[in-house]
Amino acid sequence: MRPAATVRVVELFLVESYRSKVEPESLAASTERARSAAEELAREGTPVRYVRSIFLRDDEICFYLYEAASAAVAAEAASRSGLTFERVVAAVTERPPRRRNAPPLQLRDGG
């Protein structure tokens, strides 16, 4: 008899970090560290995955999105990556269905 499979519930968490728009470090470098730290934790058996980053240049805020078992796990991944952050909050996203053969987006002139 095989043991029952364990199901781990993961949620989305948003890690909010201040990031100066004139900061010399590139967004690509910090997101690579965030991804690597999450992968390291996952290899150690902690359910976590880095999803993406969103940088709001005018607000000088960067959001790092993680799938994780808890806010504490997302915070641990962010800490291991060297990020300094203000808070970690649960997040919900919804993706619209993809349309096949959708026409390209048409941009209008401002006038």
Image (tube, grey):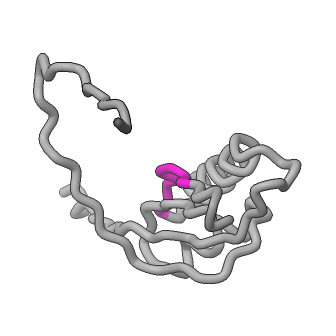
Name the residue nearer the viewer: 4 or 16: 16
Based on the picture, tell me whether residue 39 belongs to the magenta stretch.
Answer: no
Name the residue at the right extreme.
Answer: 24
* 50 on left or right of 2: right
Left or right: 96 in relation to 44 = left
Range of residues picked out in magenta? 47-54
Instruction: Give the residue at x 70% y 41%.
Output: 28
Q: Position of residue 94 (x, y in %)?
A: 22, 57
State whether residue 32 is above or below residue 63: above
Judged left or right of residue 44, residue 70 is left
Q: Position of residue 104 (x, y in %)?
A: 24, 21
Q: In this view, does 4 lie to the left or right of 8?
A: left
Q: Where is residue 29 in the image (x, y as percent from the top left)?
A: 76, 43
When the figure is inspected, residue 86 is found, relative to residue 16, above or below; the finding is: below
Q: In which quarter of the image is residue 6?
A: bottom left
Q: Main secondary structure of the magenta part?
A: strand
Of residues 81 and 105, the one nearer the viewer is 105
Residue 54 vs residue 66, the one in the foreground: 54
The residue at the point 84 percent across, 55 percent down is 23
Q: Which residue is drawn at 37% across and 72% down?
A: 91
Tell me the residue at 11%/29% (across/down).
99
Number of marks present in the image shown: 0
Q: In which quarter of the image is the C terminus?
A: top left
Q: Nearer the viewer, residue 83 or 39?
A: 83
93 up-or-down from 50: above or below: below
From the image, which quarter does the N terminus lie in? bottom left
